[in-house]
Image: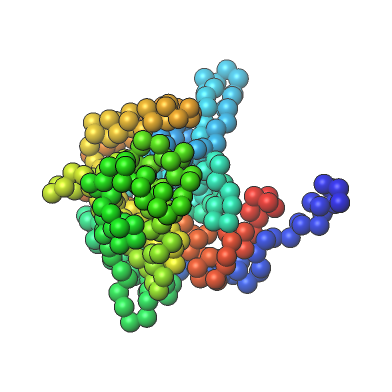
């Protein structure tokens, strides 16, 4: 079959019309939920002059040129609307939410598409526990992902790791991680993680812990190691930990949230550490978002924020095994 013939043969959407209707219902239900609670819907740019420096994320960049306008620059498709939304919070918006597209380079597969739909919301005056309560209400009860007759499970990162790996990731040394990988027959771990504790924690959590989470309903994992949380407040009683929570359902990560860091100085230092990690890995080095830092310096209200992947949520609602089954035109059909 020629390429032209192949393109003519697969013009139809990857998902069914029934799933399209389910997506429309899901989006309407989310908007209704926040409208009833007087949380304002906002829009922020997908194209910005800079982008987050998270070492785990790669991004799309494009040149902008208007001759003689002074606007010649590189623009980045946002991996999340977070920075712009925090600028709105600092400007006095109050609690806000956004449903939008986000973009991440190098992510394509059964659970990933380079362009995806995200719900991100920020609650002024909420701590992380209150935000997890809201996830339970919106996603657990509202969309039926709570285990029947039970509240969603909540477990610390440390407890989850010990339960499924048998050792404490907060006090373990590199040798402990290596011994576990060798004992479980994981030959790739050493090559991927080297001598970096953070990489070992992330790798083993993803490979060994996450698949066991949320088997009967939503599961919140909270109190993550501080080295994995560049945008979250550290816990006042244990600076090894940060106020971060992730939400899982049947081994699938659905959402990621923080008690938001409001110190411009601390945020700059964390960005600089991330950029150094990117430099050592040979990755692109975006400039630090000075407008975000200016907003933090002006005063971010005490708030917590959550980002929820809506394509993955829809996968759960329709029992899909691949993200292609819930998108009209994923990468293979775009």
Front-most of 20 and 92?
A: 20
x, y percent for residue 253 = 43, 58
Q: Quadrant of residue 35?
A: bottom left
Q: Residue at x 57, y 17 (%)?
A: 68
In the depicted structure, whether residue 219 falls above or below residue 87: below
- Going by the image, does 268 lie left or right of 147? left
x, y percent for residue 95 = 31, 54
In the depicted structure, whether residue 170 falls above or below residue 36: above
In the depicted structure, whether residue 153 falls above or below residue 79: below
- Residue 306 visible in the picture: no
x, y percent for residue 166 = 30, 58
Task: Give the colour scheme shown.
Answer: rainbow
Q: Quadrant of residue 136?
A: bottom left
- Going by the image, does 239 lie left or right of 206? left
Front-most of 66 and 78?
A: 78
Residue found farthest to the left:
237
Q: Residue at x 27, y 30 (%)?
A: 269
In the depicted structure, whether residue 150 falls above or below residue 198: below
- Residue 279 visible in the picture: yes
x, y percent for residue 153 = 31, 69
């Amino acid at each position: 079959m020629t390429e032209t013939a192949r393109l003519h043969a697969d013009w139809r959407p990857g998902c069914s019309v029934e799933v399209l209707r389910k997506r429309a219902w899901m989006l309407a239900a989310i908007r209704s939920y926040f409208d009833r609670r007087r949380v304002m819907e906002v829009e922020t740019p997908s194209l910005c002059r800079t982008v987050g420096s998270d070492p785990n994320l790669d991004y799309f960049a494009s040149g902008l040129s208007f001759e003689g306008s002074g606007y010649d620059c590189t623009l980045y498709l946002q991996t999340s609307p977070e920075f712009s939304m925090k600028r709105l919070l600092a400007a006095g918006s109050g609690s806000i939410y956004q449903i939008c597209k986000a973009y991440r380079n190098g992510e394509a597969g059964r659970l990933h598409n380079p362009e995806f739909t995200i719900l991100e919301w920020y609650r002024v005056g909420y701590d992380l526990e209150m935000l997890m309560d809201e996830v339970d209400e919106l996603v657990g009860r509202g969309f039926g992902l709570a285990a029947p007759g039970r509240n969603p499970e909540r477990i610390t990162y440390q407890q989850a790791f010990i339960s499924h790996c048998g050792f404490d990731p907060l006090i373990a040394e590199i040798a402990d991680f290596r011994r576990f990988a060798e004992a479980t027959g994981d030959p790739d771990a050493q090559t991927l993680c080297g001598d970096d504790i953070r990489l070992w924690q992330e790798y083993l959590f993803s490979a060994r812990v996450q698949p066991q989470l949320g088997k009967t309903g939503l599961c919140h994992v909270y109190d993550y190691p501080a080295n994995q949380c560049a945008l979250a407040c550290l816990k006042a009683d244990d600076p090894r930990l940060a106020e971060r929570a992730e939400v899982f359902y049947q081994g699938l990560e659905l959402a990621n949230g923080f008690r938001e860091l409001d110190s411009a100085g601390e945020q700059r230092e964390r960005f600089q550490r991330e950029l150094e990690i990117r430099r050592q890995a040979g990755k692109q080095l975006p400039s630090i978002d000075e407008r975000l830092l200016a907003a933090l310096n002006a005063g971010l209200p005490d708030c917590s924020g959550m980002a929820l992947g809506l394509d993955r949520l829809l996968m759960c609602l329709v029992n899909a095994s691949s993200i292609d089954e819930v998108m009209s035109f994923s990468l293979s059909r775009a």
